[in-house]
Image (cartoon, rainbow, N blue to C red):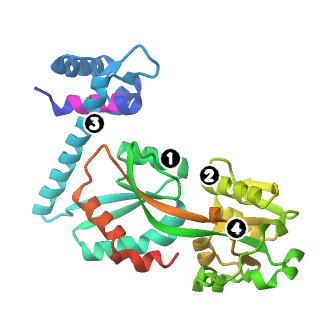
Amino acid sequence: MLMLKEMEYVYAVYEEQSFSKAARKLYLSQPALSAAVRRAEAEIHTPIFDRSTNPIRLTAAGTYYINAVKRILDIRQEMESYFDALAGECQGSVRVGAASFFCAHVLPDIAEEFQRQYPAWRASLLEVNAPDLYPCLQSGTIDLSLSVEAADPRLFHSTVWHEEQILLAVPAAFSVNQWLEEFQLTAAQVREGVHLQENFPAVDLSRFAQEPFLLLKQGNDLNQRAYKLCRNAGFRPKIVLELDQLLTACCIARDGKGCTFLRDGMARFLEDGGRLVYYKLGDPAAHRPVMLAWRKSAELSRPAKALLEFLTGTQSQAQKDRF
């Protein structure tokens, strides 16, 4: 008979890719953990792990086993939430992971409205760096993710939740601005959505070929788009700094150190004191989808399904229009 505790032990080894690390996580001795995994393998009459590799890997049967365990653990969590509700406690929660911008400016109002409509369920937010977001989603640390990075279709369901525009922010003191007044936008105009009007002109990015640039570091979607935008405009940007956070790049640009690319939503929330001017870009690469994703390997909980429907329905349109 397959035992839930042994399933949890096997799952811990799968997550840690190591018997010793899993044993420390579970506060077990390694021999005790190894014995529990062997019992689980004896129950199904086949190895779960290929122990000849380092780190250890799942066998084909082990992959099936782990996927089944994920479903079982999800069902247990749903049962716990249901019986907590019978006891008068919260019926459940849903965890949403996103970058700092979304957690600070976009998701709090959405979570608040969701909980107002579903008072027994809680929506919690987890700030996650872009490279870690999809691993967190796959491991079950979060239930839903909001990201500009494309999701692996083999592992995740995803849908376009919103489309944002990439603008160019230029220190107002730069002399290049005096020749481009007809293309300039203030932060107030960006907040009003002036740049979204079809008849508002896009600047020729090549006009900034000789200016210093502040870019995000390699591996970030906006880094790749920045290079593509400049390449399509016929030049390679003169980079003075590469940074981890978009907000940091914007603040340094505000101090007059260089031009930077930024999402239009950031321009709406950034206090620039009139020290930045913004430009609309006509390149298709300046249009970027914001993706909502969830994993394929596990059934969404009832709270997660409700939030997904809330996010993809008309109920969150007002919040989407804010950024």
Q: Position of residue 301 (x, y in %)?
A: 24, 55
Q: At label 1, which amino acid type do we have? A: Asp
Q: CA distance from mark 2 to mark 1?
A: 12 Å
Identify the residue position indicated by label 4 in the image: 250
Q: Is residue 43 left or right of residue 49?
A: left
Q: At label 4, which amino acid type do we have? A: Cys
Residue at the image point whose x is 71% and y is 80% from the top: 201
Q: At label 2, which amino acid type do we have? A: Asn
Whether residue 111 is visible to the viewer of this picture, yes or no, is yes
* Closest to the observer, 148 or 4: 148
Asked if residue 217 is among those painted magenta in the image, a careful observer would answer no
**Which of labels 4 and 2 is toward the front?**
2
Residue 47 drawn above or below residue 224: above
Badge 3 or badge 2: first in the primary sequence: 3
Q: Position of residue 187 (x, y in %)?
A: 66, 82
Q: Which residues are magenta?
A: 6-13
